Image: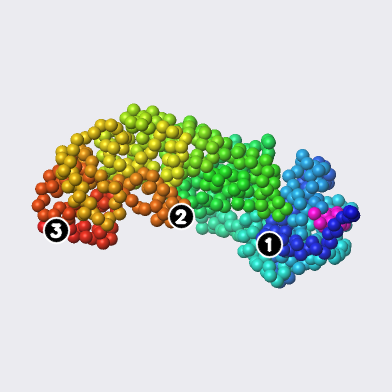
Amino acid sequence: MSKGNISVQVENIFPIIKKFLYSDHEIFLRELISNAVDATTKVKTLAAKGEVKGELGDTKIEVKIDAAAGTLHIIDQGIGMSEDEVNRYLNQVAFSSAEEFLAKYKDDAAIIGHFGLGFYSAFMVADKVQVITKSYRAEDPAVMWECEGNPEYTLTPAEKTTRGTEIILYINEENKEYLESYRIRELLNKYCKFLPVEIKFGTKTESTWEGEGDEKQEIKTEVDDIINNPNPIWKMKPADLSDDDYREFYRELYPMSEPPLFWIHLNIDYPFNLTGILYFPKLKNNFEIQKNKIQLYSNQVFITDDVKEIVPEFLMLLQGVIDSPDIPLNVSRSYLQSDANVKKINTYISKKVAEKLQSLFKSDRKAYEEKWSEISTFVKYGMISDEKFNEKANAFTLFKNIDGAFATPEEYKEQVKGLQTDKNNKIVYIYTNDKEAQYGYIQAVKDLGYDVLEMDTIIDNHFMQHIEYKGEDVTFVRVDSDTADNIIQKDEVIESVLSQAEQDTIKEIFTGAIQGADAGHIELKAMSPTAQPIVITKPEFMRRMKEMQAMQGMDMNMFPDMYNIQINTNHPLIAEKLLKMRSADKKADFAAYLHDLALLNQGMLSGEALSKFIARSLEFVK
């Protein structure tokens, strides 16, 4: 048996870097500017400790394009490097100067980089890279490092006299897009929008006015175009911010969106560091999960807008930013890595959202009720998908009835259980998902003293099943799923005015008249004479299944579109008019007409069937 060490040749590293280090080549700009921010942060830290003499002067980072030369320049006025440091930091792949600096000044500086590979991302887009650098130490001369994407490099003296580093990328043929001003501005806006050091990209014209009246003149001045906001409000204390500050920042993040309903300012330093602001946007009933709306940062460097690992799924409906240096990233910072901190952050955010909603509910219930239609989908989705959120949300979830009255689940149960408890001791919650289309059914149950809830959001089918599962004594019944006097399933029975023989005749007439229709069970039922002659009902279970299919984009035909027919044997049109008709054809035609009338009342008559119904109605009028 023998033992040995696997030798990794440096020649193999550059092809790997160029092809596999980062999934998107555009990341190179984020990495290089992050390094420039680190260098600037370091020099500021040293200056604060008295280790840098004199004034720091301008510490902006500048990005420049030289289209004629085919080069992109990233220039900082940070700590710089000596020849020895260049050898250590640029010529030893994955030896991170940030790690070394952090070890020495861990309590004084927020340093972005940890991996030591970010600089080499430049070779994904450049045939050649030059680094011209001058250390903050006056005695160290400037040097220029040059490499063409292979293990060979040159290190020569440079004429640079000011502190800092300039990186020059000679952009290769397949990446010429990075010599376009609009493309670089796009990337700076995406990845560097909130970096803590000002970033200059070109200049812009600013206008001021001098003089008064007819002598008033516009003075135009060329100034640096600073593309970032180095002091985003999530880094500030909530006590120092106004509502207008939060709204203005929201406009900065989402310029085309409506103003948010409210927001949560996150700020925690134990057991992990996390800051951020989460906004509650106005949601539409027909919502889709809003992906890529929450932005993740690490020390103000944009990482990703795919935050499903650290944000509970239902919170993906929110918008805003989360910033944490403690979120574990892979070497390219492209993907979150699952660990205990991620789970803690997930739990913490969910808890803070629940606390905010509870606070709003308690402090101003009327204002909360006014917002309910816009946040109900979010709250219901959270209850269904997150058990801990569900436990808290029962205190601030609301039911709304068709008269506009609100109640928490516990309050509503107390309100209706006296009248709406059936013979099996189940409390029946009657609801409508379309109060206009189901108007007749609603009036029928209201005439009996029952209350009707509005459950008209796309998520309500799932939410009702959730409530039924959690509360075994509660069941939801849509207002058109049965006749009004049968919804609560009491034992009271209304006697029919027809004999059994007459009822058999009525059933036979209707069975023949509507043969071939999509009707399910035909039932004769003695109801009030003032109720409808025919009532169309839809089985609750089958209807819910179809609606959940539609929400999930499944085949709507998996479950049949069935309905049941209940014939009111006490209605005069049935008990008197229909039975007294002499012609069998007229009886069948009249039965079919009453059936179509019931379908029309449910919005279920269309196309050819509707045209025939209208023609038949005109004949009856004649």
Helix, strand or loop status at disc 2: loop
Image coordinates of residue 218 in percent, x first then y, are 57, 58
- Specify start and end residues of the magenta stretch as a single range: 81-94
Mark 2: few/some/many CA within 10 Å (<14, 14-19, 20+): few
Amino acid of disc 1? His
Residue 93 part of the magenta-drawn span = yes
Task: Count neighbours of disc 1 (C-alpha within 10 A) and say few if under 14, some if 14 to 19, many if 20 or more.
Answer: some
Q: Which residue is pictured at 76% across the width and 51% down the height? A: 115
**Residue to which mark 2 is pinned:** 553
Seen in the picture, residue 137 relative to 8 is either above or below; the reply is above
Query: Which mark, by number, is residue 619?
Result: 3
Sequence-first disc among 3 and 2: 2
The label on residue 25 is 1
* Quarter of the image where one finds residue 192: bottom right
- The answer to whether residue 33 is visible is no
Type of the residue with mark 3: Glu
Q: Choose mark 1 or mark 2, whichever is in front.
A: 2
**CA distance for labels 1 and 3:** 74 Å
Q: Name the one closer to the observer, 480 or 166.
A: 480
Marks counted in the figure total 3
Residue in the picture at 43% in, 52% down: 550
Q: Quadrant of the N terminus?
A: bottom right
Q: In screen coordinates, is 360 left or right of 492? A: right
- Residue at x-position 62% and y-position 64%: 182
Rendering quarter of residue 80: bottom right
Distance (Cα) linking label 3 and label 2: 43 Å
